[in-house]
Structure formats: structure tokens, C-alpha cells
Amino acid sequence: MRRPYGIALHPTLGTLYIADCDNSRLMSYASGAMNGTRLLGGSGLSNTQLLAPVGIHLDFYSNSLIIANYGAHNVVQYPLGGTSWTLLAGNISGFAGNTSTSFNYPLDVVVDPMGNMYVAERDNSRIQFFNGGQSIGSTIAGITGVTGSNATTFNLLSSLCLDSQLNLYVSDSGNHRIQKFLRY
């Protein structure tokens, strides 16, 4: 692997899923295995390829992995056992943007139990929220395209986490801090 980023562990199967960023692929490792299996990959924009995947989220409700496809500026869903992904949000052609339907380098993604999706974007310096099943998002934290160090801005977002109360934690690497946002 080259620059592995996102990881997700399936708690009942023991399978470890890894976003292998520089190899533009998604790998799985069975419990105790030394060698992995490529699930998706090869640098590109087709629905069997990825382009520098970074963050991944294991969604039990849909039995799939949600992938922040960093280099393609989109978020895709890969059903476990499938052969291709489906676009959830962003541009299918790989173009960056700053609208409610586009991303500029999505780094991480989490999905809550209601199917709502939260996406951290590096170059737009924002967290986008998508109601379950929707591809039009709204900015719930940060200011699109503005970096800073006050309570409403970010500098180099890197990862997201939801707690059991659905409060959102954001790793704001450039500001050397973790920010907490109350349930949206």
C-alpha cells in the first residue's frame, strides 16, 4: 500500500477495509490475513475505479462502504460484495466545485443512523450535510472557500466523527484543534 488513509473494521466479520490513496484502490483484509483483496481500484473515473480515495465509512444499514473519492471530487457508495460504486454526491466527471452539489477535495465522510451524510472538504473549508438519499447539501460548519482560526472557520480539515448523541467532531489540522458541533 502507498499512503493508506481511511480504515473501517467490520465488527462481526472482522474484515478490515482500507482506502489505499496513492494506489487509488479499496482493499479488504480478512481477520488475521497478511494479504488483502482489491475490491475496487485503478486510477480513473469509471464506477469500478477510484481516484485517490481517502475517508471511508462502513454503513451497516445499506451494507456498504461510503467513500470520500478525493481526487474525483465526489462521494460514492460501494455495496459490500458488489463490483461497482454508485454516486451519492459530487460531480461524476471529476470536476471540483463549491456549490451545494459539488466538492473540492472531500477528505472524510460519516453517515448517521438516519442515513444523513456529513462530508469534510479540504479546499472549500466546510462541512456539507446531506439529508438521507439527497444529493444537494447544505453547509453546516465552515465558510465556503474561507480558511481561518475562529470558531466558524477551518484550516485543513482532515476527519469527522459522530458520537452517540450525534454531536459532530471535526479534526481541524491546520489550527491544531478538534472542534465539536452540537447535533444538527
Image: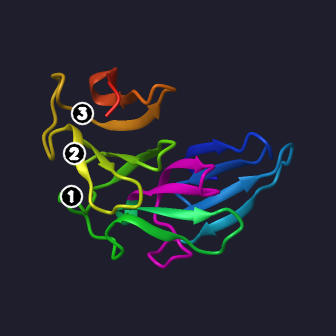
Q: Determine whether the residue tagged by mark 1 lies in a helix, strand or loop.
A: loop
Q: Determine whether the residue tagged by mark 3 lies in a helix, strand or loop.
A: loop
Q: In the image, residue 152 lies at what x, y percent?
A: 17, 28
What is the magenta range? 43-70
Q: In the image, residue 132 lies at what x, y percent?
A: 41, 54
When the figure is inspected, residue 44 is found, relative to residue 75, above or below; the finding is below
Q: Is residue 125 visible?
A: no
Mark 2 or 1, nearer chain start: 1
| Outermost front residue | 114
Mark 1 or 3, nearer chain start: 1
**CB within 8 Å, label 2 to label 1:** yes
Q: Is residue 18 left or right of residue 165?
A: right
| Residue at x 23%, y 32% (from the top left corner) | 154
| Residue at x 21%, y 62% (from the top left corner) | 97
Q: Which residue is mark 3?
A: 155
Q: Which residue is mark 1?
A: 100
- For residue 89, which quarter of the picture? bottom left
Residue 139 badge: 2
Nearest the viewer among 3 and 44 is 44
- Three-letter amino acid code at the position of disc 1: Ser
- For residue 147, which quarter of the picture? top left
For marks 1 and 3, give the one nearer the viewer: 1
